[in-house]
Amino acid sequence: MTGRPNTRLADMFRLAGWSKGELARLVNRQAAALGHSQLATDTSRVRRWIDGGETPRDPVPEVLVSLFTERLGRVVTTEDLGLRRPGEAGTRRSLHGLPWAPHRTAEVLTEFTGMDLMLNRRGMVGAGAALAAGSALSDAMHDWLRATPASDAVTPDDPSLTQDAAGADRYEAAPVGAEEIEALEHSVEIFRAWDATRGGGLQRKAVVGQLNEVGGMLAYQHVAHLQRRLWGVAANLAALAGWMSHDVGMEPTAQQYFLIAAHAAREGGDRPRAAEALSRAARQMVHLGRPADALDLMRLARSGAGPEALPRTRAMLCTIEAWAHATAGSGQAMRRALGEAEDLFVSDRNDEPQPSWMQMFDEADLHGMEALAYRTLAEHDPSAARPAEQHAGQALALRQQGRDRSQIFDHLTFASSCLLADDPEQAGVHARRVLGSIGTNSSHRTWDRLRGMYRLTDRYADHQDTAGLREEIEQALPRAPRPPRGVRSGGQLV
């Protein structure tokens, strides 16, 4: 009992809309179903959890996680409920409990992926939550990203070290060898290629399931070099799960996976990889129209990447910062960031192999991001439309086979730039190429960009060809889905 209210649990409790008596009865019923028939929670006990900061004993935290997850229609973790496990000392940590202690990362990873899989088996998607602000994440993680992680300070090469006792019954941990880790690394490449071709909707649950298995493996303390590789696999899978979740509109879930990826990368001592995961969270913020949050995250990512970040990695980070500046209408800052990105990209002599997670950022991607930044700025400054067209054309010319989603984005950027440059005929050419392929892709973001392009056709509604294009787009756009049954609408947590 801390004597202080558990504000996170209180927020979730208000959002769920239960009375304290209802929650007590639900906890007892769920616990009994799990074989804990002796549990007898009452209203006063629930009040002590919320108003007095009392941490309930096992199995109540997991029961609460399950109840809130089902009620809110999104993944809820013990961190979200502000609950510390018995024996964890100290005061409650900052937002989402960030940064997590080293021994907590695998636990959070496994808990979150397990709840995500359960939620989606019931046909629910992320709802009833809001993204954490970029400044809050940056403040919470600033010092942690720069510090030497505990796993760097102590490198247990003694194979006799096994999983800690607290995790033994939870994870059924067992050792894995180099061949198994190599197979896991190869599976990441397969999932990544599928995502680039068909979007995140079709394989998202497979990636989450694989990540859940890796979390179990991480509960066993392997020799140092194998443990680092496992953390690398976890970081790559978590970043991909986040990207796929973002691709299908599951934004709070995506943000949590990006945070898991950053933590996993730091556990493995890979600061550039942690920075790249945070940059994905920044791209998510720009997509959602929150450039200030994106810039907060990019300052954290760029400062935390460390001197070991290769020039191409730093170039990629600059392009995301440029897009955020463009969204805010800051043309000078955007051009400065893009100039830095170009200089860094050409300075990379490839004398060191690029990490696997940077394989997708090539010259085509550089031009694609430059096109997107200029196209975004063109809504504030129409003179930026022509450079956007030029970069989009270069991106399309350089795109490799299998990057279908990126090609759709390039055509949409080109079409939007043409509309902003008063060239509706050329815009129609690229827009119709999108309409011919967008239906084979599971990415919701492509539809979001198509809607943005459609909005720009308003000024040409009397133009004969554009009027026909507008009708084609209206027929192609999917209707907004109805909320899943059992998911409540209502307020959002800030």
Image (tube, rainbow, N blue to C red):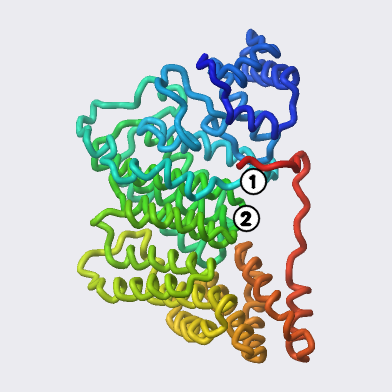
Kindly identify which numbered label has been placed on residue 378: none
Examine the rendering and report whether any part of residue 402 can be seen: no
Q: Residue 350 at x, y = what percent? A: 24, 70
* Circles 1, 2 touching at the beta carbon (< 8 Å): yes
For label 1, the crowd category at 10 Å Cα-Cα, with few meaning under 14, some 14 to 19 and many 20 or more, is many
Tell me: residue 365, above or below residue 97: below
The image quadrant that residue 213 belongs to is top left
Question: What residue is at 54 percent from the left and 83 percent from the top?
Answer: 385
Q: Residue 122 at x, y = what percent? A: 69, 40
Residue picked out by circle 2:
249
Residue picked out by circle 1:
126
Look at label 1 and name its amino acid: Gly
Residue 257 appears left or right of 173: right
Sequence order check: which comes first, mark 1 or mark 2? 1
Tell me: residue 484, above or below residue 330: above
Quick one: 276 or 235, which is closer to the camera? 276
Look at label 2 and name its amino acid: Gly
Query: Distance from label 1 to label 2 (Cα)?
Result: 8 Å
Q: Residue 110 at x, y = what percent? A: 48, 36
Question: What residue is at 62 percent from the left and 21 percent from the top?
Answer: 50
